Amino acid sequence: MELLSGAALAWQQYRSLLRKNATLTWRHRRSAALQLLSSLVFIFLIFCIDRAIRSRFSYTTAYRNVPDPEALVAPPIPPCEDKFFVKEPCYDFLWSGGGSARVAGLVEAIRRNNPGRLIPADKVLGFRTPDEVDSWLFDNPMRCPGALHFQDINATQIKYGIQTNSTPVARRGTFEDPTFKFQIPLQVAAEREMARLLIGDPNFSWTVGFKEFAHPATETFSTIARAGPTFFLAIAMFGFVFQISALVTEKELKLRQAMSIMGLYESAYWLSWFTWEAFLTLLSALFTVLFGMMFQFDFFLNNNFGILFLLFFLFQLNMLSFAFMISTFVTKAASATTVGFAIFIIGFLTQLVTSFGFPYSTSYQKSYRTIWSLFPPDVFAQALNILGKATATPEDKGISWNQRGKCQSFETDCVITIDDIYKWLISTFFLWFVLAIYFDNIIPNVNGVRKSVFYFLMPSYWTGKGGGKMQEGGLFSFFGSNRPADDATPTDEDVLAEENLVKQQASNDEVDPGVAVQIRGLRKTYPGSFSMSCCRCRTTKPFHSVKGLWVNLEKDQLFCLLGPNGAGKTTTISCLTGITPVTGGDAMIYGHSVRSTAGMSNIRRMIGVCPQFDILWDALTAKEHMELFASIKGLPLSTIKSVAEQSLAQVKLSQAANVRAGSYSGGMKRRLSVAIALIGDPKLVFLDEPTTGMDPITRRHVWDIIEEAKKGRAIVLTTHSMEEADILSDRIAIMAKGKLRCIGTSIRLKSKFGTGYIANVNFSGNGYTQSPNINSNTEAPVNPNIQAVKWFFKERLDVDPKEESRTFLTFVIPHQKEPLLTSFFGELQDREGEFGISDIQLGLTTLEEVFLNIAKQAELESSTAEGTLVTLNLLSGSSIQIPKGARFVGIPGTESDEHPRGIMVEVYWDQDDNGSLCISGHSDEIPVPANVELGRLPSLSRRASMGRGGPVGYIIDPNQVPSAR
Ligand SMILES: Nc1ncnc2c1ncn2[C@@H]1O[C@H](COP(=O)(O)OP(=O)(O)OP(=O)(O)O)[C@@H](O)[C@H]1O
């Protein structure tokens, strides 16, 4: 099938990723609704703040236009309880009169004649002098709103003065102006009663009205300008956090890496995210302005709609590209909320500073403004400030579209216009977006791979041609001072032969046409790292994970790579698929080098990978996965649907094709991963432990699929199932400690590395036997047939049973006995009736045994090479330090007259759960045989020399010990 390439492929990938993003948004629609409609909640909150502020200042006319002020006519003295924050008992007013009876009468008249309310006598308190009033006020704060001070001069003259608390106060959303509430009523009452007294007419009456000037609002306040920046930042933070989380999830779950292996263009990836999020941002900005208009804010009604929409859109878009940039530093999706919170707090504080006038005024240098404006919330806050002032009072008619590039009349200190703010937002949007792509390339990805800091200066980056550009480790990683990889010649003849063949072909730069992959001395070293924490430097050493592989992988064959955990299998696959760069050597895949960028992009079009761990979107169905990967791979659009359906049918997932992968069982996920690996008919397929977690029936079914898939392609399989390797493989290689230990067909490995043949003899009837060699003291009647067969094996082949029961015997027959086997088993078959044998089975030892032998041998080699010491506790009670892996160990200081060469032990080793060697037991202490040449005592380790681990034993060559176990 012809696959798409170039611009057509990039366009197809872009559209599929866009569809994937839209589907994910739909599947997480609650989050999307929160992102889009959060503005409704926040604008409602701003509306509440606006109402609260308006009602708080409703008693004052400073914030509103007063074209026709109302007159306050003959106001009464209010009861003292009306005063805000007054303490009870309280007095309506105090007075002083120098002891004058006329003044006392005057006060009496004020009390009685108060319009609408007689002031009780106990609500008025009189003093002789103003000083006494002051003294009382000082001792009794907040118990009286005002005082009158009279001075009785003569018959025709009385002087008076008024004392009130002039501080305006607000309470529960209302405002108290002491001038109009207390001072003017006291003044009117005092003057009215003085006039009546002096004229001598108790009915003398006048009407006095008090009116403020007609005036426009003298104070301006815009709730949106004040509270808006924080609330609108909060709206943008929803999108910000969701975006970081989505990007980091794809990175953390290696979904992006899986797509890259399939040939995803980076540009398609970024653009698809950008387009989709920009669309959501556009809706969010539109909703914000519409909700603002719905709540009848002058800010939204009077400023031009286009100006507002563009401002909110550009701001949220800016926060989006800022999120792209921040996401490159975040490695865990769970951290997205923390990062979002931190950015919100910083934004809130810098907006607060902006609202105080910094740095958008001529008093500050332009450089301050430049730096400040890089952070999107700051410049946005300034825009809200300008637009808020433009609609602060009903007189202000907002900013029209044509005025956006001009300084407004109300701005006394104009340094930035709305147009300038747009330019800033557009520039910083591009800045963050470019930085996002740059950091994404130079910060190590999940595999520790990154590009050089100056990658964009290299022509190969732009042309796509040239050598490998990837680097490894963090910016503080190093390769220096590492132990060189062990390049020793392989000990196994088959591995050596393979190596020589590949070396010869490589030196002639020839690739056998039947070979799909030629691995030429592939080496991989993970760099060491250097980090500082709590004033301490921590370093890790470079690690040689693959130490020079030379191997050909043939077409139409399944090559199985076995090896214990940490052997380097996955690393090898990662190098071949371009996930991680190779440190040394090369590999040619269908003639393309994995070291070249151009080669790798060709390779990606030919390979399919089923990674060790399922890399799937929980929210996407199997069908959606298949369609996405098919289009990333470049299958023509018209074929994608049918290919996806066929592939799912092949792995028996048709029934669950429309079910989300998140609800799949482990086995179903593995099957989907296998189907993804095989999509697009790749010429080379890597299957990294493809059947892990599958039940036996499904596993056999997947084996059938793999067997079928062998035709016309090469398959590299890694597995921990020996049965799987045995059934599927054409060739098997076992790796351990980064090196190839053996290679060949299953039969070849079994015959070469197995202990020999396994013979199972089953008996008819129900005999009795003594429990196996195997620790039992219970005596039971002995089945004479079993005894006879055991004796027969012992006499002819010199082997004892490995396992036995009442009805069967199992023998392991060494390879050396092979020449005797034909006649032996011929005779045994002839005597079947005599021995009561019902069945005889003969087979090679299992692949598992081969695997264990190789793994143990590799562990032994590496332990010996490392020279690590472990403690051996002897039966005599003492302990010695012995080199890990040593089989015969001499005990220093045991020389005596009886044993002049000293004593030695044979140590038995096993592997623990991690594959490390551990002592499983040791022989009795025996004298060192006379023919043995004694080794040199190893230099004492630091631990031993400190006397904590006992003396250090020395290794005795096992070949010299005559009766090695
Ligand atoms: N990014 C890395 N940085 C440092 N060391 C690594 C890195 N990746 C792998 N290694 C080391 O390389 C060695 C080989 O790892 P690899 O994953 O290839 O083993 P494997 O044979 O696939 O094992 P398994 O069967 O457990 O999957 C291991 O010791 C591992 O710790």
Image (cartoon, rainbow, N blue to C red):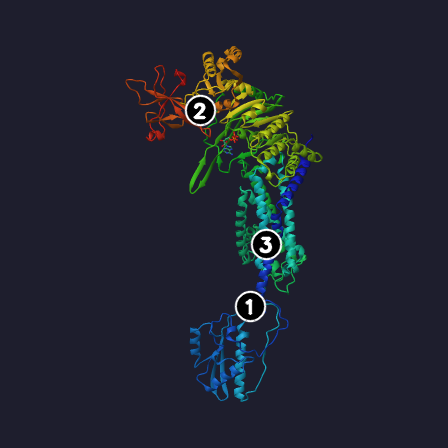
Instruction: Report x, y in % for residue 394.
Output: 64, 65
Counting residues from the start of the chain, the first of labels 1 and 3 encountered is 1
Q: Amino acid at mark 3?
A: Phe
Q: Residues within 10 Å of mark 1 (few under 14, many from 20)?
A: some
Any mark on residue 174, and which?
A: 1
Q: Residues within 10 Å of mark 3 (few under 14, many from 20)?
A: many
Q: Residues within 10 Å of mark 2 (few under 14, many from 20)?
A: many
Instruction: Report x, y in % for residue 715.
Output: 60, 26
**Between 37 and 403, which is closer to the camera in this rendering?**
37
Instruction: Please state which of the two labelled residues, at mark 3 or mark 2, is closer to the viewer.
Output: 2
Any mark on residue 232, and which?
A: 3
Q: Is mark 3 within 8 Å of ligand 1?
A: no
Q: Is residue 213 visible?
A: yes
Quadrant of the image occupied by residue 890 = top left
546 displayed left or right of 285: left
Any mark on residue 860, and which?
A: 2
Counting residues from the start of the chain, the first of labels 2 and 1 encountered is 1
Instruction: Report x, y in % for residue 622.
Output: 63, 37
Q: Amino acid at mark 1?
A: Thr
The kind of secondary structure element at disc 1 is strand
Tell me the quarter of the image containing the N terminus: top right
